[in-house]
Image (cartoon, rainbow, N blue to C red):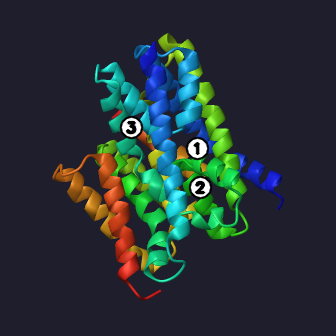
């Protein structure tokens, strides 16, 4: 498959997730408008940051009267997992020129990263351009929805009304099914979930740190096992 | 207003650095042995951690929705069907119960 058709198939495959992203983009635009962002500033942030949950948290902090630094720290903490996201797809970047590594890094989000891995489990020929095609469509949808959210702030329904907030949980459940490689995954996955439950229940860490910690401890269990 | 632009520039710089650091890190880690087992297991562990956090933040409606979504995912391996089923169940539970 040439790079163009691979990117197109990445864009097509991401459509169900892009609908969820659109709903969140509208909600983000509404929040940004309340925090005093213009439509242009909201669009700019969408293109340059392209990290939905971090943008939502940072802008919410700003709207709540926390300063720029506090808003920044909240957003950055939420994005730490992106370090692990891009590290875990290193195969996709091997032998790529610098501009492609930079582009691919920026266009890596939870949704297209996870979908690319899930599809690669079935078809290993899919790779870098599948990720980039999906990411490009997500940027477009995220920015347009955010701008529309600012412009039509008064008329945006709450995503919870139609259970759209559950879209990502359902999507990630489907994707984890595709990422399951067999029984050798059981111990790492159970460890990851257990660590997340303990960390959040004991309120040792907030959710964004719990995800990073769960991912790392699960991977550590996989590293020390020798049975695969 | 300076705050939105300032926040955007700083958050964009920090977020991009995080993403690119991961790419660089991935390139320098050994290509076999424990590091590779860890990196190969990492996506699944991150995704189930993410799901766990989302479900801990929810309640019985979301837990039932997740169970139905898991059943559909196991039966069909279809992303759209799993999303539609999960959303429909959570919507119905929130609306009618």
Q: Is residue B73 visible?
A: no
Image point 58% across, 45% down: which residue? A106
A126 sits left or right of A88 in the view: right
Q: Residue furthest left?
A: A202
Image point 42% across, 53% down: which residue? A81
**Marking on residue A131:** none
Find residue B46 and report its horizontal and vertical position in percent. Answer: 42, 59
The quarter of the image holding the N terminus of chain A is: bottom right
Q: Which residue is mark 1?
A: A17
Image point 51% across, 50% down: which residue? B19
- The mark that comes first in sequence, 3 or 1, is 1
Graded by Cα atoms within 10 Å as few (under 14), some (14 to 19) or many (20 or more), the crowding at tag 2 reads: many
How many angstroms separate mark 1 from mark 2 (CA)? 9 Å
Pick the residue in front: A11 or B73: A11
- Check the image and report above or below for B58 versus A67: below
Find residue A216 and report its horizontal and vertical position in percent. Answer: 36, 64
Q: Secondary structure at mark 3?
A: helix
Image point 50% across, 14% down: which residue? A153
> Is label 3 or label 1 in front?
3
- Whether label 1 touches label 2, CB < 8 Å: yes
- The mark that comes first in sequence, 1 or 2, is 1
Find residue A83 and report its horizontal and vertical position in percent. Answer: 46, 55
Q: Which residue is mark 2?
A: A115
Picture quadrant where residue A138 is located = top right
How many angstroms separate mark 3 from mark 1 (CA)? 22 Å
Q: How many marks?
A: 3
Q: Which residue is mark 3?
A: A75
> Is label 3 or label 2 in front?
3
């Amino acid at each position: 498959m040439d790079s163009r058709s691979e990117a197109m198939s990445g864009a097509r495959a991401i459509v169900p997730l892009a609908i969820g992203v659109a709903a969140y983009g509208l909600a983000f635009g509404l929040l940004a408008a309340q925090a005093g962002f213009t439509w242009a500033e909201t669009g700019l942030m969408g293109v340059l940051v392209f990290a939905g949950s971090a943008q939502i948290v940072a802008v919410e902090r700003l709207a709540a009267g926390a300063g720029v630094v506090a808003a920044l720290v909240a957003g950055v903490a939420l994005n730490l997992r992106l370090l692990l996201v891009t590290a875990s797809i290193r195969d996709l970047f091997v032998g790529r020129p610098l501009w492609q590594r930079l582009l691919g890094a920026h266009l890596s989000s939870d949704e297209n990263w996870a979908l690319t891995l899930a599809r690669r489990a079935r078809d290993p020929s899919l790779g870098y351009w599948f990720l980039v095609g999906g990411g490009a469509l997500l940027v477009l949808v995220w920015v347009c929805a955010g701008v529309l959210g600012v412009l039509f702030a008064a008329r945006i329904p709450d995503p919870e009304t139609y259970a759209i907030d559950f879209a990502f949980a359902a999507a990630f459940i489907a994707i984890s099914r595709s990422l399951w490689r067999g029984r050798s995954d059981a111990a790492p996955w159970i460890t990851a979930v257990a660590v997340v439950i303990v960390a959040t229940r004991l309120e040792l860490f907030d959710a964004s740190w719990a995800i990073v910690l769960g991912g790392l401890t699960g991977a550590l269990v996989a590293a020390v096992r020798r049975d695969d | 207003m300076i705050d939105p632009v300032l926040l955007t520039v700083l958050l964009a710089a920090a977020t991009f650095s995080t993403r690119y650091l991961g790419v660089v890190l991935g390139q320098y880690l050994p290509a076999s042995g424990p590091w590779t087992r860890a990196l190969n297991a990492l996506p699944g562990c991150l995704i189930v951690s993410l799901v766990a956090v989302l479900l801990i933040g929810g309640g019985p409606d979301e837990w039932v929705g997740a169970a139905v979504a898991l059943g559909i995912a196991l039966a069909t391996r279809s992303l759209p069907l799993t999303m539609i089923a999960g959303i429909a169940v959570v919507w119905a539970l929130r609306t009618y119960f």
